[in-house]
Image (cartoon, grey):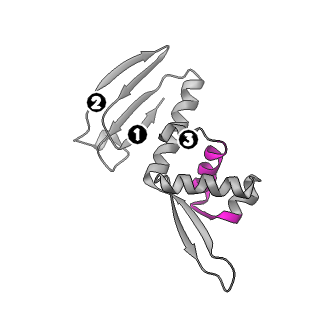
Amino acid sequence: MLLKILTKKSVKEILYLINDNEEMYWGQIQELLGVDGSNLSKVLSLLVKNGILSKRRILKGDSMPYSYFKLTKKGKTALKLYEIGELLDDNQDIKIAVSNADDDDLSDNKNSSISNSYNNVGTESVIVTNSKNINVKK
């Protein structure tokens, strides 16, 4: 389901935009991306529903509340999936290691496993482990 969501129109741009700005409200996202408001609302709702973005609302005077969006840990991991895709598209050698630690540096993680599976994909070597965190190394 996550990969299906990540391939939807404008999702990649939305996630990178929010990541670059830490937190943004709906109007900022729409203005910077030039996305139709109705479509943007649907995509943002889907991302919140699936835990990729968090949402908070702030009342400002008598006007409609501002909805602010921020990447969750799952959203930050989703950005790493885009990075992996770009490296694979460029036929670069990569190693992917996933750990159970909250720390992104696998070299310091005594509980991480080296690999559960190893695959040669063309010229790429891919190491995948059970985990929550993903490190991409070229």
Q: Position of residue 64 (x, y in %)?
A: 67, 77
- Name the side, left or right, on which 96 lies relative to 38: left
Mark 1 or mark 3, earlier in chain: 3
Real-space Cα distance between discs 1 and 3?
A: 17 Å
Mark 2 vs mark 3: which is more N-terminal? 3
Cα–Cα gap, marks 2 and 3: 27 Å
Q: Which residue is mark 3?
A: 6
Going 49% across and 22% down the picture, which residue do you hit?
93
Per the picture, the main secondary structure of the magenta-coloured stretch is helix
**Quick one: 18 or 57, which is closer to the camera?**
57
Q: Which residues are magenta?
A: 9-27
- Of the two numbered discs 1 and 3 in the rendering, the one whose residue sits closer to the viewer: 3
Could you tell me the amino acid type at mark 2? Ile
The residue positioned 45% from the left and 35% from the top of the image is 136
What is the number of the mark on residue 114?
2
Give how far across and how far down residue 71 sits, in percent.
51, 56
- Mark 1 or mark 2: whose residue is earlier in sequence: 2
